Image: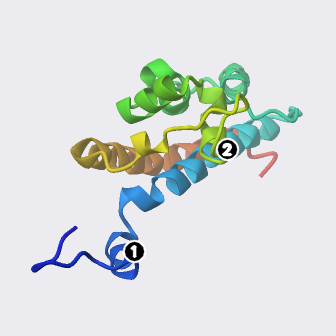
Amino acid sequence: MSYEGWHWPSDEEFEEHTKWSDSNIAEPVLFNFYHGIELSLKSLILAKGNEIEKNHKLTELLQTVSELYQSEELLCFYGKYIHLDKSPLVIQEFCKASDITMDFYFQSLKYPVSTKGEDFDLSLLRAREHHGIAFFQELYNDIKSARKLLNKIVSTECNDVV
């Protein structure tokens, strides 16, 4: 960001102009998204009358959900964001650089360093230009589709709990 003339923007001006850019909101959006994935998986498990343990491992929760529900569409949505080899490139690159699996991915959005004391390079999630725009647009579209699908599944398979 630059201005006509010789001066740079003040901190306040910079903040105002970039407050909605992915350089400021990527981590909170992704943290909330992955927390939503965790809670929705747990909800699906509870809706079938099963208990859930204190577990934040998305791969294990997805495995349980895949045993309870026969929806290929549902498993495809969750699989895309939980199985690293199916995840969008932005997520894959961040996890590879941070040496983490998807089970610990959203923890990296919550804490600045790993349990080994290493910093997470969160800049890999921000300011990705066309890749970032495409990623967040795809995420938005997937969320819209998943909401419809989850509403359908809950209304047809979980009536006794709802």
Expressed as whole percent of the image width and height from the top left, the position of residue 82 reads 56, 28
Residue type marked 1: Glu
Q: Residue furthest left?
A: 4
Quadrant location of residue 65?
top right
Percent of width and height locating residue 20: 38, 68
Question: Which colour scheme appears in the figure?
Answer: rainbow
Q: Amino acid at mark 2?
A: Ser
Q: Position of residue 102 (x, y in %)?
A: 59, 28
- Which sits earlier in the primary sequence, circle 1 or circle 2? 1
Residue tagged 2? 40
153 vs 53, left or right, is: left
Mark 1: give few (<14), some (14-19) or many (20+) Cα within 10 Å.
few
**Crowd around label 2: few <14 · some 14–19 · many ≥20 (10 Å):** some
If the image is split into quadrants, where does the N terminus sit?
bottom left
**3 and 64: which is toward the camera:** 3
Which disc is residue 143 wearing?
none
* Figure check: 9 above or below 90: below
Q: Secondary structure at mark 2?
A: helix
Q: Quadrant of residue 131?
A: top left
Left or right of 2: which side holds 11?
Answer: right
